[in-house]
Amino acid sequence: MTRYVGAAEMADLLRREGPEPILRRIMACLRADFLRWPEFDLAPRLASHSAGGVIELMPIADAQLYAFKFVNGHPGNTRLGKQTVVAFGLLADVATGYPLLICEMSVLTALRTAATSALAASVLARPDSRSMALIGTGAQAEFQAIAFQRTHGIGEIRLYDIDPAAVAKARANLEGRGLRLICAGSIAEAVAGADIVTTATADKARATILTPGLVEPGQHLNAIGGDCPGKTELHPKIVASARTFVEYEPQTRVEGELQQMPTDHPVTELWRVLRGDAPGRVSRDEITLFDSVGFALEDFSALRCLWEIAGSGPGLDLVPETEDPKDLFGSVFSRGQTLERAA
Ligand code: NAD
């Protein structure tokens, strides 16, 4: 049987363990996998674009495990009562090709994205950062807030969204978790004086959520919403003025804020900073930008971490049971019965 973790089991697991320990474990897996980056078979994701959004397949493998994620991005979905991003993923054994785990990844994507954001901030944000502006308070927002609170000591979150109901939702969900929550009246109000600015908006457009006058020296920008061709959040002048860090350069050049920049705009891949091969933040006043689009390695780390956490449990019979591996036909039709029926 292939271990199956569906949405209900994922929710049970999070309620039982709490989001913080799971975020920490995903971060540890992420760090370990980023540190062994050259061991992976890397490729940009395969994207199928349509008028309303995108459907993507994200494959990756090392010598032991193969993973892929199916994920969409449909910013108009919430108007239909559906989520912008839904996902599921699979982990397989490289030696045999057999699937090991099939897993819901809508929640797991929010967790791994938040864990990746916090991991990047650990080398890019000022160590004494205490406040974060969160622009776009949809599905990803609470996961981002909790990850930054628990791993980076962020105590104050300034929430802003064009949809007041989304702000009220995030505030209600985060209440009682030891955060000082401020509902800002504008993006400018949220960003002024914040140490970290996370942009998590969804719009299939060249949006300018942040314009140059808003960004202050020393801020770390965690831009996660611009993750698809024709979908950006930052004014190009901000990207030009910030030191830019990416997950996997070939993918981010096409999908990230970088798509607005000349093809030789300098960037550093995060794994190099984590390994100590390239500097992260070098001064208090520089603006750092994590131009995050989401990369397959993060899903691989999250899936292998979840596989460990979930342990044994329900499975799906994705692979037919055969006594003789060459007798696939016989696993479906018993010989005598088939002949009787035919007769
Ligand atoms: P969502 O639709 O649940 O939330 C997006 C929010 O952005 C909504 O509440 C919407 O009202 C708000 N918004 C839209 N335009 C805005 C504007 N101009 N100013 C302020 N708020 C605005 O989507 P989500 O699941 O939270 O995802 C947010 C974004 O992050 C999406 O673009 C998604 O594709 C992206 N994402 C990236 C990664 C990654 O790894 N980088 C992972 C997951 C999601």
Image: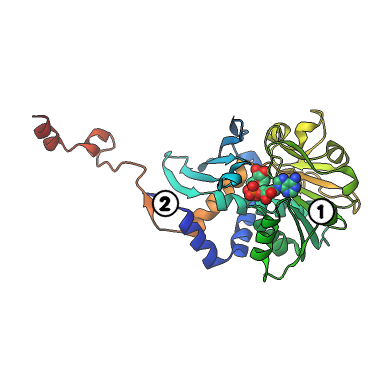
Please tell me which residue lies in front, 85 or 39.
85
SS at circle 2: strand
Residue 124: numbered disc: none
Residue at horizontal 53%, vertical 65%?
15
- Asked if the residues shown at circle 1 and circle 2 are in contact, with their CB atoms under 8 angstroms apart, the answer is no
> Along the horizontal axis of the image, is 322 left or right of 286?
left
SS at circle 1: loop
Pointer 2 residue: 3
User: Which of the two labelled residues, at mark 1 and mark 2, occupies the earlier sequence position?
Assistant: 2
> Along the horizontal axis of the image, is 59 left or right of 282?
left
Q: Position of residue 75 (x, y in %)?
A: 63, 41
Residue 274 visible in the displayed image: no
Name above or below for residue 316 compared with residue 127.
Answer: above
> Along the horizontal axis of the image, is 38 left or right of 319?
right
Name above or below for residue 281 compared with residue 313.
Answer: above
Quadrant in the rendering for residue 253: top right
Residue 186: numbered disc: 1
- 1 vs 2, front mark: 1
Mark 2 crowdedness (10 Å alpha carbons): few <14, some 14-19, many ≥20: many
Query: Label 2 amino acid?
Result: Arg
Please tell me which residue lies in front, 229 or 284.
229
Query: Label 1 amino acid?
Result: Ser
Q: Position of residue 315 (x, y in %)?
A: 38, 52
